[in-house]
């Protein structure tokens, strides 16, 4: 007797043999997959109180988002396309204008978006940019984690330090007003340590903690000065030491030319290191990634990928492990990993002027098993295999843009989008069935998100950032974005 049977689907296992099964079935007991085979084989050996008929659907492991930002869900599009205003919103909101309620509401919104798009595991940096972390107090991380737990998806929350100089000004909002206070690196490290002890590996491995420090390059000597750069170097090493001691992923946002070599000099690369963006890498830096066993999170839809290219095809050819990330839902993206898979293919094919690069199966691996490997979770998730966690999604193939009904392996990558995901199971629990979210009241999630956004706008006075700029219509280039 199993708990759940999924029958009559096109099962895409992404197991070591990359087996696909026509009229396939999956049996789930508790939080684990206990059998995979043809429907006839599974029904002959198993029964269950819950049977999901997957006729006309593809059955895949849950997708994994290798890099995103918590908080972004409530500030997307602010500034109307002006990056300077959007970053101002990030810095202000994430340090002095956000409450635990803000982080709880945003976590539920982002997790529900991921759930609807079939993203069962995701990385979320508790803040924005490569240095703005809400780690002055554990209450904000607690609020985020609780929101994710309520939705039921699997999350890796990255917490860590800001770039020097320290102390940095943060604020706690109370009924009496704004209480500003200084926060040191030691304070932020203590917050991280607290969140690790409270949350890492909890709730059936659905809540996990990673550590992060700002990316450093040699040119930071100019912006920070020698003394502060020395502190930043020591702090990066300290956080990686803490990550290694606790068996955690260590990540850094915004890697670009020179920063990988700098990280190697500090001794912070290695099998637990996940380097995001990684644009404009030199050949020597690509080899450093391979030699140290570090991982890359490529975000093809991000602004960073417009400014410079992540050499994904070169990294993969050299033997590096590369996963895909959304970079969060702001300022202009979504959590739909199908969108980012398609963007990834076209991005690098355009670079090479050759459509043979990155076949669809390769990018599907990048947001399933390769992403699981980057997070150190490939023994538990990332593929449909007996003994692994039951993180399973069903994709509706019986839709006009998915027809004709042939070559389903190609269709789920080339033509599917997040709204084709019909059913989602995480940890053996059905969180969405037939496009209806079961784990939370979706209307309440949206209402809470809107209320917290309105309160944040009132606190910051940033409502003008919601105005449509004059450059929106009739312009070839939004010049307002480059004016001071």
Image (spheres, rainbow, N blue to C red):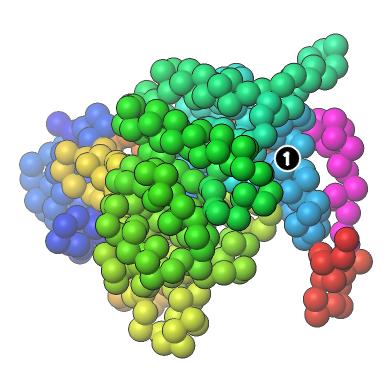
Q: Is mark 1 on a helix, strand or loop?
A: helix
Q: Residue furthest front?
A: 226
Question: Number of numbered discs present?
Answer: 1
Quarter occupied by residue 162: top right
From the top left corner, tell me how far across and down residue 427 is, in percent: 32, 34
Whether residue 206 appears in this view of the structure is: no
Q: Is residue 478 found left or right of 380 in the rendered image?
A: right
| Residue drawn at the location 70% of the way across and 29% of the way down | 168
Q: Is residue 428 found left or right of 476 in the rendered image?
A: left
Q: In which quarter of the image is the N terminus?
A: top left
In the rendered image, residue 456 lying in the magenta stretch gets the answer: yes
As displayed, is residue 248 above or below residue 416? above
From the top left corner, tell me how far across and down residue 342 is, in percent: 47, 69
Q: Is the magenta stretch mostly helix, strand or loop?
A: helix
In the rendered image, residue 466 lying in the magenta stretch gets the answer: yes
Q: Residue furthest top?
A: 176
Q: Name the residue under label 1.
A: 91
| Residue drawn at the location 78% of the way across and 45% of the way down | 88
As displayed, is residue 205 above or below residue 361? above
Instruction: Tell which of 474 and 219 is nearer to you.
Output: 219
Instruction: Tell which of 410 and 101 is nearer to you.
Output: 101
| Residue drawn at the location 54% of the way across and 48% of the way down | 216
Instruction: Tell which of 212 and 389 is nearer to you.
Output: 212
From the top left corner, tell me how far across and down residue 436 is, in percent: 50, 42
Q: What stretch is highlighted in magenta?
A: 452-469
Packing grade of label 1 (10 A; few <14, some 14-19, many >=20) is: some
| Residue drawn at the location 85% of the way across and 11% of the way down | 176
Q: Quadrant of the C terminus?
A: bottom right
């Amino acid at each position: 007797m199993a708990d759940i049977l999924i029958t009559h689907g096109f099962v895409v296992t992404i197991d070591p043999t990359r087996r696909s099964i026509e009229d396939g079935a999956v049996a789930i007991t508790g939080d684990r997959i206990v059998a995979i085979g043809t429907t006839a084989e599974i029904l002959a050996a198993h029964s269950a109180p819950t049977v999901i008929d997957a006729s006309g659907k593809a059955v895949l492991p849950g997708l994994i988002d290798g890099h995103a930002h918590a908080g972004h869900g409530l500030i997307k599009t602010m500034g109307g396309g002006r990056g300077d205003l959007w970053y101002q919103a990030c810095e202000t909101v994430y340090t002095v204008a956000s409450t635990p309620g803000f982080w709880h509401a945003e976590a539920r919104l982002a997790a529900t978006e991921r759930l609807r798009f079939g993203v069962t595991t995701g990385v979320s940096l508790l803040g924005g940019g490569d240095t703005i972390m809400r780690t002055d107090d554990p209450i904000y991380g607690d609020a985020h984690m609780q929101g994710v737990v309520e939705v039921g998806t699997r999350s890796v929350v990255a917490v860590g330090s800001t770039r020097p100089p320290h102390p940095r000004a943060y604020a706690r909002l109370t009924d009496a007003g704004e209480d500003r206070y200084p926060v040191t690196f030691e304070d932020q490290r203590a917050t991280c340590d607290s969140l690790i002890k409270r949350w890492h590996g909890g709730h059936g491995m659905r809540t996990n903690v990673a550590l992060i420090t700002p990316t450093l390059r040699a040119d930071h000597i100019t912006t920070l000065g020698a003394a502060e750069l020395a502190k930043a170097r020591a702090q990066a090493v300290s956080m990686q030491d803490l990550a290694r001691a606790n068996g955690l992923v260590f990540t850094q946002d915004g890697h670009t030319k020179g920063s990988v070599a700098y990280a190697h000099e500090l001794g912070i690369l290695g099998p637990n290191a996940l380097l995001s963006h990684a644009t404009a890498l030199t050949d020597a830096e690509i080899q450093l990634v391979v030699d140290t066993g570090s991982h890359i999170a490529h975000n093809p839809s991000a602004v960073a990928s417009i400014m410079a290219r992540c050499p994904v095809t070169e990294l993969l050819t050299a033997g590096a492990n590369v996963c895909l990330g959304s970079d969060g839902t702001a300022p202009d993206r979504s959590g739909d990993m199908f969108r980012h898979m398609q963007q990834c293919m076209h991005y690098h094919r355009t670079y090479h002027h050759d459509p043979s690069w990155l076949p669809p199966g390769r990018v599907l691996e990048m947001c399933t098993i390769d992403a699981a490997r980057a997070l150190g979770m490939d023994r538990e998730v990332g593929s449909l295999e007996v003994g692994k966690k039951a993180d399973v999604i069903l994709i509706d193939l019986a839709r006009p843009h998915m027809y004709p009904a042939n070559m389903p392996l190609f269709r789920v990558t080339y033509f599917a989008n997040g709204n084709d995901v019909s059913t989602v199971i995480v940890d053996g629990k059905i969180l969405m069935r037939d496009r209806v979210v079961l784990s939370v009241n979706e209307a309440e999630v949206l209402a809470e998100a809107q209320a917290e956004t309105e309160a944040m706008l009132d606190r910051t006075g940033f409502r003008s950032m919601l105005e449509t700029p004059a450059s929106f219509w009739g312009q070839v280039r939004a010049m307002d974005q480059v004016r001071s």
